[in-house]
Image: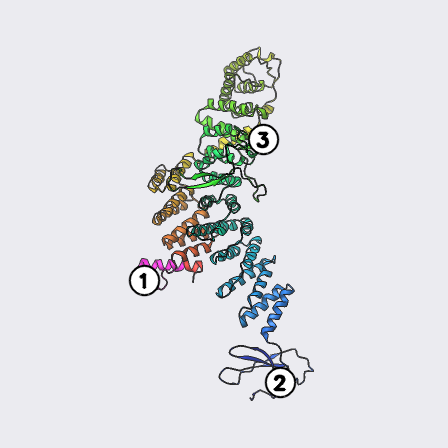
Amino acid sequence: MAIKLTRKVFVNPCFLSYNSSRFLVRLSSDRDTRYFLSKIFGGLQESGVICRHLSFSPATSLERLSWEGSSHTVLLTKLENALKDLKLDEAWETFNDFIRLYGFPNHLLVSRFITQLSYSSSPCSLQKAYDLVMMVLKEKSYHLQPDILVKLALSLSRAQMPIPSSAILRLMLEKGMFPPMNVLQLLFLHMVKTEVGACIASNLLIQICDNYVQFCSGKSPCANLLKPDTVIFNLVLDACVRFGSSLKGQQIIELMSQTGVVADGHSIIIIAQIHEINGQRDELKKFKDHVAPLPMAFVSHYRQFYECLLSLHFKFDDIDAAAELLLDMNRSRGSHPMDDPGKDFQKPRFVPIGSQNLRNGLKIQIMPELIHKDSALKEEGKSDLVLFRDKKLLPSNRALSKLINGYKRHGKMDELSKFLLGLKKELYSSGESSVICDVIYACISLGWVEIAHDILDDMESSGDSLDSSAYMALLTAYYKRNMSREANVLLKQVRKAGLVINLANNIVLSKNVPSNVGRSPLSIKEASSIYQPSLSKCLVEEVSDAEKAVSHIIYELNSSIYFFSKAKMMGDALNIYRRMQEMKIQPTEHTFMYLVCGYSSLEMYRDITILWGDMKRIMETGSLTLSSDLYEFLLLNFLRGGYFERVMEAIGYMNKCNMYVDKWMYKSEYLKIHKNLYRSLKASKARTEAQGKRLEHVKAFKKWAGIN
């Protein structure tokens, strides 16, 4: 073989690499120049000469032929050494060089590399591990062990990278790989710490539950491996409360029923919070019969439950129910000890979802006595209405102010007096008997002196004596308002009660005050020390807030729509919706969510698009804001119904509001239902203009979702 060169040099060939089409030869000369010669199948040909200057020693002389190892071995050795020395960046570069030349190395080395990247705390390294897994999974003949994927998913979740973490987990589920339940718990524990993670976690739980139900219907032996436990449900439900996804929370509650997962004491508290946000009083009331008889040991835990139920009573403007609940919170405690032989406290009880008369209605299993002390959930929640003190549940000043204002609006002050007497009787041992005086002081501070006097009269009629300071406070208020006739009546009551009071000089007396008033031996305290500022302040705020509060009629109408939607009686639900429009009552997000859920259960997707038109019109006026929960549910239903123009509209609204959109979920839904839709049809061959436009929307969605 003759080699034609620009000048005559002696060369030392060293074999570098070989593949199916060519091999490369390294040539070195005293001119410090490397020449590459290519041998091509079909015979030897003269190749072009490529020159690169190298840093050879100036003392280079003629060398003997010496063969080095192949670059395949060199790169593998370099990669193994980099992994051994934990030089992940160098390993990544070497790995990419190897892939470009030879494809993937053996699976053991790949698994080792993924594992080392997974153990890194660097988000960059974790992203590389995820990218590598995606590359590997495209090779259909290549198999990664489940434990490798689990480690990576857990590391991504810990690093608050929920999107790639969920992608790994979803791929495992698609391939029939089911992580252990304790690992799933850790994944969800870290995932729900952020709003995006909570959104993905809830969608992931829905996917797991759907797979579990399908496996159960097919009597698959793998079903039990996939069944989520109470801990995972609690983590997701708690995240729904923290990030305001109450509509998604309602969906998760129903999944607990469908999968047969038992709700424990923590679940009940979170469910109560979700029902309170959604305004579902009837749903929450079903739990009360199971919570109320619990022994004293559970009182502190279920304070939040009573908080939520009481809040709903006030939202529905049901003041009588609120008063009854406040009196009932501490009754019958301890009459049902845990060792009661007549009651099996370890047996789950069933609570219906929706109407209990539905033949195929859902029922959730609950165990109120089951409370795990080592739970990852923190028992927080607001304490606006119900307090826990001295082993009892007590109404807060805000609760009392709502009750006082409610009874005043309804003109039922005699019922307020009955409530106060009952409350005093229930809380006497707690040192709370002064609550009646506190209410009187608060009423006086708002100028409701007639109401304060009525309460005093009711207390006298019941034989309940009050401190003289209450009389003195009211008397002072009368004098300051020049209400001498009322003051004289009150003075007669004071003498009849056997109380002796002295009007101090700081009271502004009217002209008609009897001359013997100032000669009583007792002196009155300053007004500032009589009134309880906290209750008075709460009452002032309540009066102001009540004028801005959502009307109880909206809660009642929404409850009716929810009831009929769960019963699949959409004609009745729609009639209530139309009545709201006739009454000029603004529908809320919950109104539309209940209607959409009802139509979805009947697969009436066209009706959902009509509702979507109503939503858009109201949103344009600025009177309605939709959450990502409702947008997600609309998107899924538009996809199922094949309304791709509406799909892209909803996506546009979500992007405009900077909401996270879980593309994986919609991509999976599309492939499940419309995999072959318009696969070979071109726009030029569309039979109608409508079909052509629909084809454009389908293509736009596929491009957005990354469907090839």
Q: Is residue 621 left or right of residue 226?
A: left
> How is this picture coloured?
rainbow
Task: Residue type at mark 3: give it.
Answer: Lys
Residue 701 seen by the camera: yes
Towards the viewer: 528 or 455: 455
Label 3 – label 1 distance at C-alpha: 74 Å
In the rendering, at what x and y percent does residue 86 appear?
64, 63
Residue at x 47%, y 57% (from the top left corner): 174
Residue topped by disc 3: 391
In the rendering, at what x and y percent does residue 363 appear?
43, 41
Which mark, by number, is residue 292?
none
The quadrant of the rendering that contains the N terminus is bottom right
In the displayed structure, would residue 395 be above or below residue 252? above
Question: SS of the residue at dot 1?
Answer: loop
Q: Earlier in the sequence, mark 2 or mark 1?
A: 2
Q: Is residue 9 left or right of residue 400?
A: right
Circle 2 or circle 3, nearest the eye = 3
Question: SS of the residue at dot 3?
Answer: loop
Q: Which stretch is magenta?
A: 675-700
Q: Are marks 3 and 1 in contact (CB under 8 Å)?
A: no
Which mark, by number, is residue 686?
1
- Residue 650 included in the magenta stretch of the image: no
Label 1 neighbourhood size at 10 Å, few (<14), some (14-19), many (20+)? some
Task: Residue type at mark 2: give it.
Answer: Val
Residue farthest toward the front in the current orientation of the protein: 341
Residue topped by disc 2: 11
